[in-house]
Image (spheres, rainbow, N blue to C red):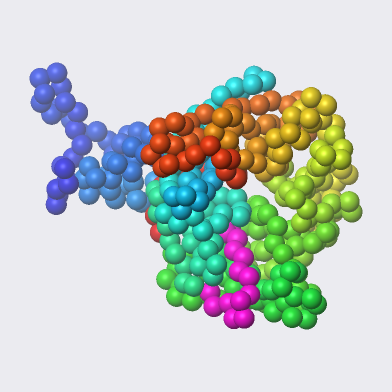
Amino acid sequence: MANSQPSPLRNLDQSGNYTRNIPLDLVLDILSRLPAKPLLRFQAVSKLWLSIIRSKDFVDTFLTRSKTRPRLLLTFKHFDSRKRFIFSAPEHEDDKTSSTVMARHDMTFSDLVYYIESRPVNGLVCCIRGSSIAVCNPTTRQIVTLPDVIAPNGRDVYARLGYDPVGEQYKVLCVMMFDGFDSSTSDNIQQEHFVFTMGSGQKTWKKIETVTKDPYRCMKGEVCIDGVVYYGVGHKRIARFDVVSEKIEFIQGPEDYNAVSCYARLITYQGKLACLSYDFYVTSEMYMWILQDAEKQEWSSVVTCDVNSEWRDLWTEERVLCTGEIRSNEAILVSRSLKSSELFCVYYCDMISKRVRRAEVDGIADDEFRDVHGIGEHGREMLCFPGHVENIMFF
C-alpha cells in the first residue's frame, strides 16, 4: 500500500516481528535484477519504490543489464480486428543446431495502420501513420505521439529513431519528400529534413539542412551505432545522420552493394556498420562488407559465405528475409510470413564458420490467442528485428 510517509523496508523474523532495516543499496540491487513486468507492478507498492524504479540511475542500470539479454521483436497486423500485435522472444544463443524459444505478447496497437519500418533503439520503436509519428515502448506499453508534421501537396513522410549518447537523448529524424513514384525528376522531390528531441519539451519539429543539395528518393532500413543513424538511399549511397550534431552526410557504399535492394541490409558487425547482401533465388552466397573508417569511407574486402543447398532451398521456399545480426559473426534470417499451421522459424548464419542453426519461435498467436482476437488461417506478414531490449523508461 502507498503511504504519504513510506515506512523503512524491514525483515520479518519467524515470529512475524520486524527485526532490522534492509539497506537501500541491497533493495536497489535486488530490484535491478528483476524482469521488467514485476518491476512495473512494484511501482504501486509505495512512493519510495515508485521513485526508485522511475529514477534515472535505476532505469540506466536496468537497461545496461537488459542489453546482456537481447531479444527479438516480432510484429504483425491483423486486418479483420484492425490491430497490430507486438511480441518478443529471447535471442537464441544455444550452441545446438536447432532449438525452441518462447515468445511473449508485449503490446497491441488498436489501429493497424501504424507502420514499423526500422529497428528498435534501446527498446524503443518508431512508428508512423501517414503524417503522424509516434515512439512506443513495448515494455511499458507507452505510446508517445509527436506533433504532426505538415506535408503539403501530399508528400510522403519517413521517420527514423536515433539515440544521442552524449546528451542522453532520443531524437526522431523526419524526412518529407515525393518519392520516385510520385515525381518524374529530382527537381520536384521537395525534400526536407526535420528533427524532434524526445522529452525536451519541444513543441514543433526543427528543420535541418543537409550538406548536399542532391536529394534522394527513398529510405531503406536503419541501424543506429554510437550516436549515428545509417540508412540506405541509393544503389551505392548511404545516409549518415549524426544524432548529436543533427547533421546529415552521405557515404559511398561498397562497389557491388545495392543499399535499397530488398536483398540487402545494413547491420552491426562488432560495433561497426556492415552491409549484407544475398539473393538465394540467383546464388547460394551471402556477402558482407564492413565500414572500417567512416571519415575516409573505407570498406573491408567482401566476406563471402557459401550456403549449402539444403539451407538455400529451404530459405527460398520460405522466402526468408535478412533482418540483422545477433552475435559478432551471425546474420539473422526469418520467415516473411506467419502461418497458422506452420512453425515460425529464425535462422542464424555464421558468416565466418558458415554454420547455420535454427530456432523455432513458439507462443506467437497460439490457439487461445487466435480465438480471442479472431485470427484465421491466412498467413500474416511478419516483421522481425534483432537486438531488442527491455527498457522501463517513461517519457
| Residue 236, quarter of picture | bottom right
| Image quarter of the C terminus | bottom left
Residue 128, horizontal then vertical, whole percent? 54, 62
Q: Along the line of sight, which residue is nearer the eye, 329 or 186?
A: 186
136 over 285 or under it: above or below: below
Query: Foreground residue, 293 or 305?
Result: 305
Q: Position of residue 102 (x, y in %)?
A: 50, 29
Seen at 53% across and 63% down, the residue is: 129
Residue interval drawn in magenta: 149-162
Where's residue 178, x and y in %?
A: 69, 73
Q: Residue at x 45, y 75 (%)?
A: 203
Residue at 44% across / 31% down in the picture? 367
Please tell me whether residue 159 belongs to the stretch shown in magenta.
yes
Rendered residue at 35%/33% (across/down): 30
Out of 184 and 118, give the one closest to the viewer: 184
Can residue 330 be seen in the rendering of this structure? no
Q: Does residue 144 appear in the picture of this structure?
A: yes
Left or right of residue 76, residue 225 in this image: right
User: Nearest the camera: 186 or 255?
Assistant: 186
User: Would residue 109 be counted in the magenta stretch?
Assistant: no
47 on left or right of 104: left
Residue 255 located left or right of residue 199: right
Res 155 → quadrant: bottom right
Can you give x and y, in whole percent of width and height, for residue 132 in the image?
50, 67
